Amino acid sequence: MNIEITTLADTEVSCANCEACCCRLEVMIITDTGVPDNYIKTDRWGGQTMARLDDGWCAALDRNTMRCTIYEKRPLICREFEMGETECIAERAN
């Protein structure tokens, strides 16, 4: 089986066409980056994740611009998820 990996150059992902697909993923808060409390959901065991809207999108996503409203204070996982990299391309394909 030959699997082709798409690269950033192949897809030309940019802020203008990002579609914020990663904002539908569950994001665990594992470090303190200053995420405002109203965007944090704590489960019954004390684990923290980014709050999500009823339709599954991250509560910090501005639905008009499809950009993060807390970008400077976003969780570490969001900081490490790089636009156009393999994980990004895979999520866009879903």
Image (cartoon, rainbow, N blue to C red):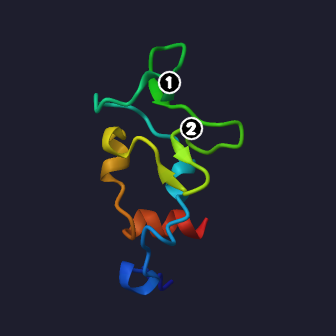
The numbered disc on residue 8 is: none
Say which label, 2 or 1, has the lower sequence index.
Answer: 1
Q: Amino acid at mark 2?
A: Ala
**Residue at 50% from the left image edge and 24% from the top image edge:** 38
Instruction: Give me the C-alpha separation between circle 2 and circle 1.
Output: 9 Å
Which residue is the extreme one toward the front? 64
Position of residue 66 measured from the top left corner of the image (x, y, whole percent): 55, 56
Residue 29 image-quadrant placement: top left
Q: Which residue is mark 1?
A: 38
Marks 2/1 in contact by CB < 8 Å: the verdict is yes
Direction from residue 55 to residue 51 in the image, left or right:
left
Q: Secondary structure at mark 2?
A: loop
Residue 30 image-quadrant placement: top left
Q: Is residue 40 visible?
A: no
**Residue at 65% from the left image edge and 43% from the top image edge:** 56
Q: Is residue 15 above or below residue 70?
A: below
Q: Secondary structure at mark 1?
A: helix
Q: Is residue 69 above or below residue 38?
A: below
Query: How would you rate the neighbour count of disc 1 (Cα within 10 Å): few for under 14, some for 14-19, many for 20 or more?
Result: few
Direction from residue 75 to residue 49 in the image, left or right:
right
Tell me the quarter of the image containing the C terminus: bottom right
Q: Amino acid at mark 1?
A: Asn
The numbered disc on residue 59 is: 2
Position of residue 11 measured from the top left corner of the image (x, y, whole percent): 46, 81
Residue 5 image-quadrant placement: bottom left
Q: Is residue 17 above or below residue 35?
A: below
Nearer to us in this view, 70 or 41 = 70
Position of residue 36 measured from the top left corner of the image (x, y, whole percent): 41, 27
**Residue at 46% from the left image edge and 39% from the top image edge:** 27
